[in-house]
């Protein structure tokens, strides 16, 4: 991945801040991709087929009957109303962010940031032989294991959980021998489904 370190440092729009769960704390990085994808998906299914398959599944020999029912649906003619869609749910918003950690001062070591993220995708050691969720995540205890992220002044997401972290470490080093920079891909998602009215919370200053 090619990027200009000086341009990154001087561009406030690429500055990315992760407010990770304790004890990791605040981690600062720079967004290095040209764009940041934001979207969502809503799932629908044919009411007719959904209802028929569920009904057939409750009968004796359900497996064979369902299979036969599906074949029947493909062979007979149907009315347009049989294609009416039934909403079955939405997927939670997910995000994929390319970042860089850069050694700006002699005391900097971007590997420290790598460790903080990797600790968030591996089990937490509770006691001998016992493992807990990464970052101590517990949906029943406050906001444990969740974090917030901001990009410049144009994107903010709260109540996120870390789902992936992958890094590439530069072979170039500073005078102390630590890597000049580390690039990484961070994936995260909302810990629970959001409502339509909450979408604007991702975009500070957007009203309506």
Image (cartoon, rainbow, N blue to C red):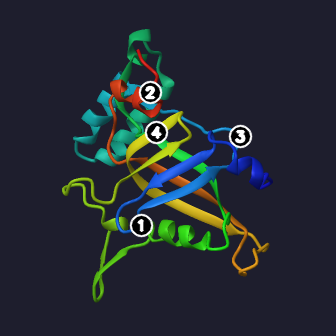
Q: CA distance from mark 3 to mark 1?
A: 28 Å
- Residue drawn at x 22%, y 41% as measured from the top left: 58
Whole-angstrom CA distance, mark 3 to mark 4, is 18 Å
Identify which residue, 43 or 6, lies in the foreground: 6
**Which numbered mark, 2 or 1, is in the foreground of this view?**
1
Q: Which circle's residue, 3 or 4, is located before the other in the chain?
A: 3
Residue carrying label 1: 24
Q: Are marks 2 and 3 in contact (CB under 8 Å)?
A: no
Label 2 sits on residue: 73
Residue 107 in picture, x, y percent from top left: 62, 74
The residue shown at (75%, 47%) is 7
Q: Earlier in the sequence, mark 1 or mark 4?
A: 1
> Mark 3 touching mark 1, by CB under 8 A?
no
Q: Which element type, helix, strand or loop, lies under badge 4?
A: strand
Identify residue for label 4: 156
Residue 34: mark in rendering? 3
Q: Earlier in the sequence, mark 3 or mark 1?
A: 1
Q: Nearer the viewer, mark 2 or mark 4?
A: 4
Label 3 neighbour load within 10 Å: few <14, some 14-19, many 20+ = few
| Left or right placement of residue 120 versus residue 35 in this view | left
Q: Residues within 10 Å of mark 4 (few under 14, many from 20)?
A: some
Label 2, label 4: how far apart the Cα atoms are:
46 Å
Considering the numbered disc 2 on the image, is that residue within a helix, a strand or a loop? Answer: helix
Which residue is at the far left? 140
Q: Earlier in the sequence, mark 2 or mark 4?
A: 2
Quarter of the image with the N terminus in it? bottom right
Distance between the alpha carbons at the discs numbered 1 and 4:
19 Å
């Amino acid at each position: 991945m090619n990027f200009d370190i000086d341009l990154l440092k001087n561009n406030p729009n690429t500055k990315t801040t992760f407010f990770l769960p304790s004890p990791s704390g605040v981690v600062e990085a720079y967004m290095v991709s040209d764009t940041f994808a934001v979207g969502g998906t809503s799932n629908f299914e044919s009411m007719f087929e959904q209802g028929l398959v569920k009904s057939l599944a409750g009968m004796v020999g359900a497996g064979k009957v369902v299979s036969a029912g599906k074949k029947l649906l493909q062979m007979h003619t149907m009315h347009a109303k049989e294609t009416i869609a039934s909403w079955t749910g939405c997927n939670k918003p997910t995000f994929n962010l390319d970042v860089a950690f850069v050694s700006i001062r002699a005391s900097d070591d971007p590997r420290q940031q790598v460790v903080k993220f990797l600790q968030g995708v591996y089990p937490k050691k509770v006691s001998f032989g016992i493992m807990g969720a990464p970052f101590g995540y517990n949906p029943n205890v406050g906001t444990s294991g969740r974090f917030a992220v901001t990009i410049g002044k144009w994107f903010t997401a709260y109540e996120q959980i870390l789902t992936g972290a992958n890094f590439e470490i530069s072979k170039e080093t500073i005078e102390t021998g630590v890597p000049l920079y580390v690039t990484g891909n961070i994936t995260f998602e909302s810990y629970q489904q959001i409502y339509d009215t909450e979408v604007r919370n991702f975009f500070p200053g957007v009203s309506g």
